[in-house]
Each structure stands twice: as structure tokens, then as C-alpha cells.
Amino acid sequence: MSPLDAIGFAFAAVARHRRRSLFSVMGMTIGVAAVVMLTALGEGAKRYVTDQFSSIGSNLLMVAPGKTETTGGFPGMGGAPNDLTLDDARALQRELREASMVVPLSMGSETVANRERHRQVSILGSTPEFLAVRQLRMAHGSFLPEEDMDRGAAVAVLGHKVARELFPNQSPLGRVVRVGDWRVRVIGVLEPRGRQIGVDIDDLVVVPVALAMRMFDRTSLVRVILKIRSPAEIDTARERVVEIIRDRHDEDDITVIAQDSIVASLSKILTALTLAVGGIAAISLSVAGLGVMNLMLVSVSERTEEVGLLKALGARRGQVLALFLAESVILACAGAAAGVALGWAMVRVFVSLYPDFPATPPLWAIVAVVVTALGIGAIFGVLPARRATDLDPVEALAGR
């Protein structure tokens, strides 16, 4: 019996039991599709985070009040015995030669109103350099004026969504809006940008940092962003930042995190989550394998006479084993192919609904799930195949 004869025999056996074969293939299809879909979402999340940070460059340092001992984590999560102040930002601007820009940040939430129109938005206090550091552009007007950090003129720059909702069908430039109890003049509107590192730029109001600190009655900054002249100077700049603030505070009470450290940390976490959810979804493949084994056991019991005839005609044990293994592998192949196609289609539908999320199934996941599906089909097909080879030819021909 040639290999082509064995394959043809297996296909014919599958075709004779279409309904049962279809249910076995469906179980394998669902398991494979689940793995493809979940790994695509995990990989998409990792790419989304990486793209978000890459969109503002790779040579940034973030300084936050409070000491975090574990490197690679989120800054500013520890205690803060001393405030990170505007004077500290000025000291970094004056003494840190490696920095081309020093951008202090203060942030809070407040109601912004234009007459009867109002909405609750995030208020960001910063300096003119914030526009360049976050690689934003102006749609209309100008950004924050060049002035001393302590002055804080009563001006504001609106995000695109805020401007559209507070001033529908009209220009907000030169108009006065209320931010809580404060009145500020609108001098610019940002171009639409969407979310950037967890902040919706379109739903944001930017004011001078000193004004924001007075609005929220704060003395401490939430962050100081440093743009380093060259990525090669990141490590040196980080050490210098710690030294400068230590000299001012008499202790190490800040966290300095490089942007690439955050990206690497998040990438490891998301990769682990992708593998975990992919592994959980792969468990369903084992259940599908049990369905294949059950089908093959029923198939062997129904085809005892056929097996007896094959053995009476001289078919060897290995050939009979190969026939039934081929049948189970064909079922697994069909399920794997259909599962990959279904999973890919589900990912495409998801991306069409959420175009900003770059979900795509990684090649390693597709290869791994197909190989796993074929391996499960073969493994769960061994028991029925061995049962077929153990049949006595005479008893099998007699239907016993």
C-alpha cells in the first residue's frame, strides 16, 4: 500500500462520517482560533505601548518625587519626603549639560466652561518646551508664551476635542474660558492627536506650570521631563540628575526612569501575559483532541470488518496504524487550517472596529498552535490506531 493509497483511504473514511468529522474539526477550530485571537491581542498591546513611547522619541528621562528602589517600574510610586519644585527644575536646567530641554509638569482635573457649555477635563501645567518634547503641533494660534517659570500668565491652550465642544463652529482664539474659579484667555488649539502614553491630548487644557500649581494649591511638581541631547548620554545624565537633586535635598528622594526602561519592563510583562493567555487557550486544544480520539474509537469499532479484510489481504500492523493515524491527522489539519483562518478573520474584524490598536497574530504563535494541533491529533489518534492493529483478522471479518 503506497502513501497516496493510505491518504486516499483516510480521506474516504472521513468523508463517510461527515457529521461526526465536522464536530471534531469544529472543536479543533475553536481552540486554534482562540489561541490566534488572544496572542494577536497580546502582541497588539505590546506594539501599542511601544509605539506610544516611540512616538515621542527615545532620549527622555522622567524625574518624579519619591524613591522607588525597583528599577524599570513606574516612577513616583514611592514616598516623597521632599517636594520636587520649580527651583529643582531650574537647577536641572542650569546644571545638567546633557539636557537640551527641561520640562516641569503639574497636573489636575477641573471644570472648563464657556458660558453654559462646560466639561470636566485634565489640566496640564507646563512650559513652552512641552510642545516639542511631546512632538505635538498647533492647529491654530500659538503655544504657551516664553516666560519665567514662576510667572504663570492667565492663558490656555485647548485640546482639539475641548475646543470643538466648548466653541462649536467658531474660533476660540482670544476668547475667555473659566477653569474652576480662574478666568484664562485661549491663545491656541492643538492639532488632533488622540491618546499619547495614557493621556488624551485632544481632551486636555494646557496652562503655564506656575498657574496650574496655583489653581490646585500645590507646591510640588508631578514630573520633570528631561530631553537628553543624545541617547548615548542617558546613563550619565541619570547619574547627574540624582547628584544635583541630592545636593539640594540632602538625600536621594527622587526616581529617575529612562523611557527605554519603561518600554522594556512593559514589553516583558505583556509578553508574559501573551504567553499565559495563549497557553490557557491552548488547553481547549486538548479537549478537541479528546473529541478526535472519541471519533476514531467509534470509527474503529464500526470498521472491524474492514480492518479484518485489510489484515487478511496482508496489510502489516504498521500500515493499519498509519491508516488510522492519517485519518486523525487529517482531522487535526482541517481544524488547524480552519482555526487559523477564523482567528485571522476575528482579528481583522477587531482591528476594523478599533483601528488604533495594532493587533496582529505573531508568526511564532501561528506556527506553534498549528504544530500543537497536529501533535495533539496524532497523539490522541494513537490509542484508536493501536486498537485497530490489535484486532484479530478472523474475528474482525466475523464482525466480532
Image (cartoon, rainbow, N blue to C red):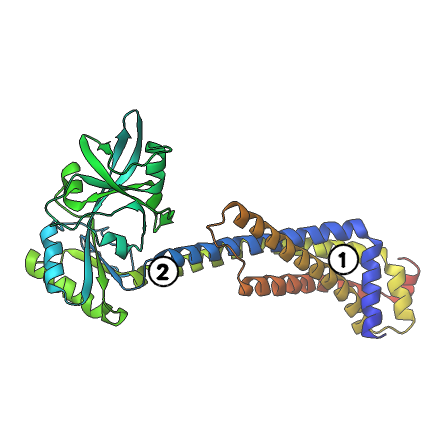
Spatial separation of the CA atoms under disc 1 and disc 2: 52 Å
Mark 1: few, some, or many residues within 10 Å (few <14, many ≥20)?
many
Circle 2 SS class: helix
Q: Which mark is residue 296?
A: 1
The residue that disc 2 covers is: 54
Most foreground residue, 354 or 149: 149
Circle nearer the N terminus (1, 2): 2
Circle 1 SS class: helix
Most foreground residue, 117 or 250: 117
Q: Is residue 66 shown to the viewer in this render?
A: yes
What is the number of callouts on the image? 2
The spot of residue 359 in percent (x, y) is 50, 54
The spot of residue 116 in percent (x, y) is 30, 24
The spot of residue 140 in percent (x, y) is 31, 45
Q: Is residue 314 above or below residue 350?
A: below
- Residue 377 quadrant: bottom right
Q: Give, as a three-letter code, the residue at label 1.
A: Met
Mark 2: few, some, or many residues within 10 Å (few <14, many ≥20)?
some
The answer to whether 340 appears left or right of 77 in the picture is right
Q: Nearer the viewer, mark 1 or mark 2?
A: 2
Residue at figure coordinates x 18%, y 49% from the top left: 79
The spot of residue 278 in percent (x, y) is 52, 56
- Locate the C terminus by quadrant: bottom right
- Say whether marks 1 and 2 touch (CB < 8 Å): no
Residue at figure coordinates x 21%, y 37% from the top left: 185
